[in-house]
Image: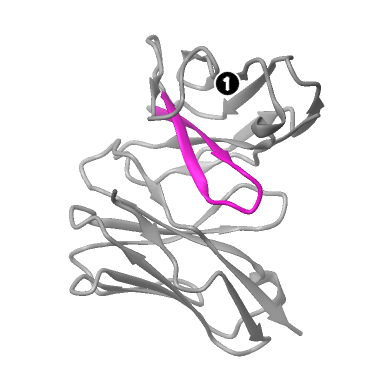
């Protein structure tokens, strides 16, 4: 599987600000995804990052709050906009190689909003 | 709605014993299942997968069992080691590629030295 890295690994932010998280994969992958994992919880899919087109968002997540970019097959960003303490979570990037059934995850970005 | 869940939120096991982590799923259309291990401070790590045309699949020290009749999945870890301490998630998907993976609630495995 491709190696996935994320930046930053963690951050502490003030409410009302925005943070952009970067996800880099070391080889071209067809599908990339963004997940949120709230403290002590399971993973919830935010959106599928589509290369060259708008991301596909899951119910409960909107582009204005979580804009996503995917300029090529190895890179994606997730922005958490106008943050509140409820946005404190781990944000995870994943990819899916050819075949699309199994997903592999990055190390995550740990966000604390004060 | 459709969901994937676990029976036990926390499991404590003596080092050297076998561990069994259970998972129930409700989506009858699911035909591909994955187990992930998440250590503290890390992202989920793929452990093993199984398709619905199989009842059992073995890896290194791990075995996944699938009972489609009762929609039940289990992960067995042989000779549990301290390094196995983590949260384990089951996840379900449908074959055909690029479908949404749905995660269960997770079980924390604590290995007692």
Q: Residue at x 39, y 29 (%)?
A: A58
Q: Magenta segment, principal secondary structure?
A: strand
Q: Position of residue A72 (x, y in %)?
A: 47, 14
Residue position for label 1 = A78
Q: Residue at x 59, y 26 (%)?
A: A24
- Asked if B52 appears above or below A60 in the picture, the reply is below
Which structural element holds mark 1? strand
- Asked if B97 appears above or below B58 in the picture, the reply is above
Magenta span contains residue A47: yes
Q: How many marks?
A: 1
Q: Quadrant of residue B24?
A: bottom left
Q: Position of residue A106 (x, y in %)?
A: 59, 39
Q: Quadrant of residue A26?
A: top right
Part of the protein shown in magenta: A31-48
The quadrant of the picture occupied by the C terminus of chain A is: top right
Q: Position of residue A109 (x, y in %)?
A: 68, 34
Left or right for A17, reference A72: right
- Asked if A83 appears above or below A71 in the picture, the reply is below
**Residue A29, visible in the rendered structure:** no
Q: Residue at x 57, y 38 (%)?
A: A3
Q: What chain is tagged by disc 1? A: A
Magenta span contains residue B81: no
Task: Pick the residue in front: B60 or A60.
Answer: A60
């Amino acid at each position: 599987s491709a190696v996935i890295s994320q930046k930053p690994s963690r951050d502490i932010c003030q409410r009302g600000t925005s943070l952009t998280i970067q996800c880099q994969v070391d080889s071209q992958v067809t599908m990339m995804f963004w997940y949120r994992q709230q403290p002590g919880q399971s993973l919830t899919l935010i959106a599928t990052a589509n290369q060259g087109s708008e991301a596909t968002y899951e119910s409960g997540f909107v582009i204005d709050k979580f804009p996503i970019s995917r300029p090529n097959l190895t890179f994606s960003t997730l922005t958490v906009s106008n943050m509140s303490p409820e946005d404190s979570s781990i944000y995870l990037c994943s990819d899916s190689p050819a075949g699309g059934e199994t997903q592999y995850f990055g190390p995550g970005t740990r966000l604390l909003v004060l | 709605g459709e969901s994937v869940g676990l029976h036990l939120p926390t499991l404590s096991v003596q080092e050297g014993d076998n561990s069994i982590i259970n998972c129930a799923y409700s989506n009858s259309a699911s035909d591909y299942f994955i187990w992930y291990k998440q250590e503290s401070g890390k992202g989920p790590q793929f452990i093993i997968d199984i398709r619905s045309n199989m009842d059992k699949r073995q890896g290194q020290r791990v075995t996944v069992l699938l009972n489609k009749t009762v929609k039940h999945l289990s992960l067995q870890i042989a000779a549990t080691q301290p390094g196995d301490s983590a949260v384990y998630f089951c996840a379900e998907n449908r074959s055909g590629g690029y479908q949404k993976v749905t995660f269960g609630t997770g079980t924390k495995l604590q290995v007692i030295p």
